[in-house]
Amino acid sequence: MKTSWMTVAQMRLLVWLGAIAFVLTSCSEKNVAGGTEAESTIALYVQMADGTPASTARVRILPDKYLSSGPAENAWNETDEDGQVSFEVRNGRYTIEARNVSESKASGAVHSVALDAKSDSKVDTIKLGELSSIEGFVLLGTSPVVRVAGLDRYVVPDSTGHFVIDSLPQGSFDVQIGDPEKVHSTTVQSNAGDTLFVDGSDTSSTVKVVKSKTSAATEYPESDWSAHEALLKQIQGYAAGTLGAAGLADSAGKINKAKGEICVVTTTDDLMDVIDSSKVDSLGNYGTSVAVAAGSFRECAEKDGAVWILFEKSGSYNLQSPLRIKSNKTIDGRGRDVRITGMGILTQESSNLIFENLTFTAPAITARDTSSRRALSIHNRTHHVWVDHCTFEEYPLIEVDIKRSSYAVTLSWNRFENAQTGILFGLEPDIYVDTAQTLTMHHNYFANMEACGVLARHGKLHAYNNFFYDVKMAGVECSDSAQCYVESNVFNIENPIAVYRLENEDGSPDVATRGFVYALDNMFSRGGENTQDALVFKPEYKVTVDDADAELAVRVKNGAGPR
């Protein structure tokens, strides 16, 4: 496993196209004798998608192996009123790009042409179509350039490795990723509709090009309990044994099998004002009281006993006050686009909970202070909680917290985006020491975090197969005697793991805030190393851990969040 790269590394390309493809038709070809040094004529008729001439369209011809290192010297030619343009070139293979802007709408096409010793001219017709873009990211310590062979395209990825090549004519392109000063580079055939990533980090091995697989959406489970059973088989890590609506937790916390009831959410309403005829003022006006809306998410969540909560329709379910969820619940958003907004969800000595396929967004409190509501707060001795395939976004401080002796929690295949910190695991020691807390987190994606992906204080954290893509301070901050077992993660950040929460006045680390890390088999693209501290626990359960590589990074980026 390499920990730094000098040339080319992994990337994912997302190619999206417009509705109209360009059509290239060879009209005629005249074969004549000629030598390799003789110049030949390429005549082009450029047409709009409807077949009308594309007058004053710009056309440029470049060798098909041309790779840009800045603005191309070859000038653009312009078609006449009949859409005609011609070039005098030597024999060889060329890429022709045509561009046109009509009524502020741009269109284009790419055409390849070859002239050999037997050809002294070629006449082709090109039809223009809508433009497309290629987007991707490169995992590298030093950013290489991204170029398209035969076209004047030269892009340097940003600090996170992200790049976009826009205004491309539709078609199939050779996209090269690599340092132009180095011999080794990677060429990818990027076709319409393909999602690709490239692993070219090892210059001594064959470059791998793999199409990324997109998982199909889950069917609405309705009342088929086999769909619930299938869900339970996916739980790994500390939350194993969680049964949700298929079990009941007793007073000692032991979870026993017991099929619960099904509650289908039929309205996006939450709390509503109702007229209270028992309260009348001196003017005869009736008073009002607040009631839980019938068929609401809150009504299902506040039921006693085991409940499998399903959603009749997609929509935003705005919580007007914090929802204190009771034990033995499966909140299942599969097959729907379920968005939880407003005041968030709290647990209170709860247990046996599953949160599946939900998006937590648009919080009611956006001020950056301690009153800011988390999307999901797992606290006060809550245990056996599984949060899977959810998205947490746009929360000002922290999106999920696990604290006050809560344990047996697993977070898997979630997206944490647009916050200061994704996960808070434990409070500051002067508030509460959470030595009993345990958390497994795997296949989670972290992006646009201003501070940390996860901040751990005390307790035991097992993090594997996560992708930290864009985190400013630390992917995992393991502090205040926390034990963090960090294996086979992908870190595309400058500071993957931190072990001190505070510094002294002279800038030295405050040893009182030190955590303990056992890091192995992680992939670091921008700095970091695997180190093993003997004081750290090793997970007592068995899980399937994938290799930390570009394929894992793309699979997590594409697969995390609601499915």
Image: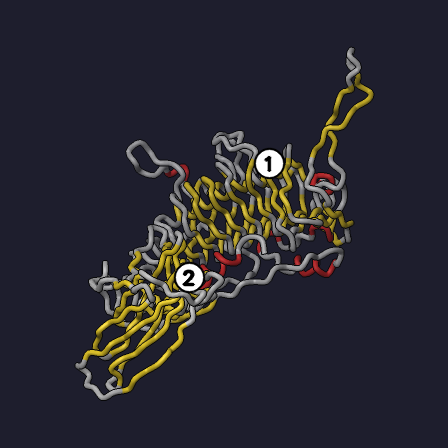
Q: Which sits in the foreground, 159 or 135?
A: 135
| Residue displayed at 37% across by 78% down | 27
Residue on which disc 1 sits: 342
Residue 7 visible to the viewer: no
Left or right placement of residue 352 versus residue 373 in this view: right
Task: Report crowding for label 2: few under 14, some 14 to 19, many 20 or more residues within 10 A (C-alpha).
Answer: many
As helix, strand or loop, the secondary structure at mark 1 comes to: strand
Q: Position of residue 482 (x, y in %)?
A: 47, 44
> Residue under circle 2?
12
Q: Position of residue 224 (x, y in %)?
A: 75, 59
- Dot 1 or dot 2: first in sequence order is 2
Q: Relative to 323, does residue 243 appear above or below in the rendering?
A: below
- Tag 2 secondary structure: strand
Question: What's the CA distance linking mark 1 and mark 2?
Answer: 35 Å
Q: Quadrant of residue 282?
A: top right
Per the rendering, the mark at residue 478 is: none
- Pinpoint residue 552: horizontal percent, then vertical percent: 46, 62
Residue type for callout 1: Gly
Relative depth, front residue between 12 and 476: 12
Three-letter code for the amino acid on which mark 2 is drawn:
Arg
Q: Residue at x 75, y 54 (%)?
A: 257
Q: Position of residue 110 (x, y in %)?
A: 36, 68
Q: Residue furthest top?
A: 282
In the image, what residue occupies the spot 33% across and 33% down? Answer: 504
